[in-house]
Image (cartoon, rainbow, N blue to C red):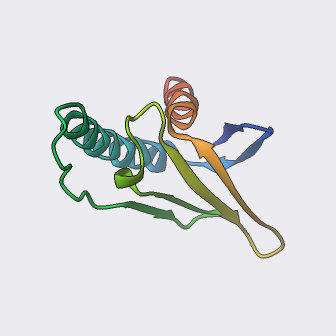
Amino acid sequence: MAPLTLNLSQGSVTFPFSAEAGRELRQALGTLTERLKTVAQAMAQKERPPKEDSLEYRHGGEVFLEIFCNPNLYASPFAAKVLLTLRDERLRLVTEGELSQLLADLDAYLAQF
């Protein structure tokens, strides 16, 4: 297990995270990106976009991580934001982050394995 650092718009947060959980999160974010692309393509063609399911990722470990994103709210994957919740028995952090930054941070984390 190695620490994962997520860079936010006004700071960063680092917490213990396993490589396996990182790969699971990367897969979930890949699916979310595809949903966002579907919405963006429909909007570009002036069509009504199909309703896509939201991402609700949860990982329980030493620190509980929850990530939520509704792909129906954003015109492209580059504009998408995610709601991040990190908590343990003493602390709870809820903030918003950019999907593109989360993907970059996660890819950098997974590159070490």
The residue closer to the viewer here, 98 or 31, is 98
Specify whether residue 1 is in view. Answer: no
Judged from this view, the residue extending furthest toward the bottom is: 89
Above or below, 55 relative to 24:
below
Q: Residue 54: percent from the left, percent from the top?
A: 36, 61
Q: Would you identify the image quadrant in which residue 47 lies?
A: top left
Report if residue 73 is visible in the image.
yes
Residue at the spot 60% in from the left edge and 49% down from the top edge: 17
Depth check: 30 or 62 in front? 30
Residue 57 in percent (x, y) is at 44, 60
Which residue of the protein is positioned furthest toward the front in this rendering?
46
The residue located at (55%, 67%) in the rendering is 60
Q: Give the number of callouts.
A: 0
Q: Residue at x 34, y 54 (%)?
A: 72
Taking the spot 51% from the left edge, 63% from the top edge, the residue there is: 59
Position of residue 58 in the picture relative to residue 77 (left or right): right
Query: Picture quarter containing residue 2?
Result: top right
* Residue 90 coordinates in the image, percent (x, y): 84, 73
* Quadrant of the frame with the N terminus: top right
* Direction from residue 50 to residue 40 in the image, left or right: right
Q: State the image coordinates of residue 36 (x, y, percent, origin top left).
A: 31, 42
Q: Nearer the viewer, residue 39 or 9?
A: 39
Q: Quadrant of residue 8?
A: top right
In the depicted structure, whether residue 100 falls above or below residue 16: above
